[in-house]
Image (cartoon, rainbow, N blue to C red):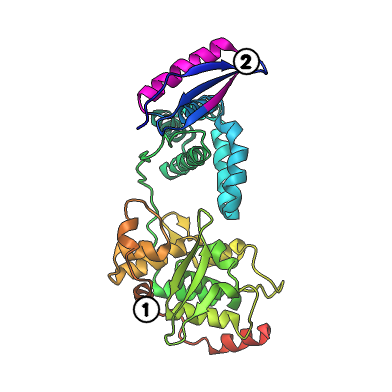
Amino acid sequence: MAKIKTVRIIKTKYGTFSLHYTNPDGRRRRLSVGPDYQQALRISIKSTDYLLEGRNPEQEILKSTQREKAQSVTIREFYPTFMEVHGKLQSPAMQKRYEVCFKNICRCPQLVDCPLGSITKPIVHDYMLLRVRQDGISSATANREAAFIRVMLSIAAQRGLLEQNPLQGFKLLKESDKRDVYLSVQEAEALINELTSSMADIVEFAIYSGIRRENILSLVIKQVRFHDLKPTGQVQLKVKGGRWETFPLGSQAVKVLKQAIGNRCEGFVFINPDTGTRYNSISKSFFRTVRKLGLKVGDTYLRFHDLRHVFCTWLSDEGVSRDALQMLLGHRDRATTDRYTTLNPLTAGKLLEKLPEIRSNNTENMARIGKVGS
């Protein structure tokens, strides 16, 4: 390490001051500190301390400036930036969830107007308990809002407003009201038979793939690849966080896709016969059929998202490990990522063969959809 020289204050011809010193890497540096001599003196003293500790004055001053900025920027003020740099990369459903979470947090001025640098785990925990006690929300809802705050602080840290996310490792509330979803093969068959053919394909594919609704509705043919030597395949999906990942498909999911695609080579996989393009929403038709059949999960009716649970439950009943299920569902839990990502995708595709067959005769529907797509 080069010998550290004393920080000198030099007045420039423009009437401002600059600090001249040699940094720990042995490089000569000049740091402009403005026209105020007293301020220049204070910064020179700090810079000397940084150099004696082997730290770079420029980096430390930048960090100090960022911390001061974080002390003034609140959640309310940072939200538009958060949505611009992160929210717009998410699915419409996730963007809507962010909006709802932010709207709820705005009801608590102590939190929404709290500077980012002052937010701590106890503050967020107290907010969650307050929401549960006063507003009567579930622990799951409180956890979603806390997760929203944690993501926002993570983006703030990435943009240099925070040195690190203060909610890293934050423990969420215990969810005692988790939905225990189970749908028998007979119930699934009754649901599919009650739906129109195009809607039935969507529901059946959801059960056989475990893919989220928006990913299914927006799926285009170019994202699908069928294997040549095996009756399996894979799809490329844009998942949470805006990244693209590949998911394996078993023969039953591939059968549904081929039926829906017919002889088409481009466009959306699942077509609304009334509009000739993708479905924007299937909630009304799905919920109407669920109510007609009386399919319930606890005290509430079956939701489309519950089909991911059905996919998981059926495979779990066949002995598929939790690590494999996390990989198949595309979960990114930090504590288990190292374990489930070691699973070979080709092996994962074979696991999907354990799913029971819902419909055994789709020849008529396949022929009809093939004609529609021609």
Give the amino acid type for the residue marked by disc 1 in the picture: Glu
x then y, percent, for residue 79: 59, 37
Q: Nearer the viewer, residue 254 or 240?
A: 240
Q: Earlier in the sequence, mark 1 or mark 2?
A: 2
Give the amino acid type for the residue marked by disc 2 in the picture: Pro
Q: Nearer the viewer, residue 101 or 42?
A: 42
Placement of 194 over or under 65, stated as above or below: below
x then y, percent, for residue 257: 53, 78
Crowding at mark 1 (Cα within 10 Å: few <14, some 14-19, many 20+): some
- Name the residue tied to disc 1: 353
Give the Cα separation between the discs numbered 1 and 2.
73 Å
Find numbered disc 1 in the image and state the secondary structure of the residue it sits on: helix
x then y, percent, for residue 70: 52, 28
Task: Check the picture and name the quadrant holding the N terminus.
Answer: top left
Placement of 188 over or under 323, stated as above or below: below
Residue occupying image coordinates x 39% and y 60%: 181
Residue occupying image coordinates x 36% and y 22%: 52
Residue occupying image coordinates x 37% and y 26%: 3
On the question of residue 334 being in view, the answer is yes
Any mark on residue 35, and which? 2
User: Is residue 266 shown left or right of residue 230?
Assistant: right
* Most common SS among magenta residues: helix
Which callout, 1 or 2, points to the residue nearer the camera?
Answer: 2
* 50 inside magenta stretch: yes
Find numbered disc 2 in the image and state the secondary structure of the residue it sits on: loop
Task: Check the picture and name the quadrant holding the C terminus.
Answer: bottom right
Q: Number of numbered discs present?
A: 2
Tell me the magenta residue range: 30-54
Residue occupying image coordinates x 52% and y 65%: 237
x then y, percent, for residue 208: 44, 73
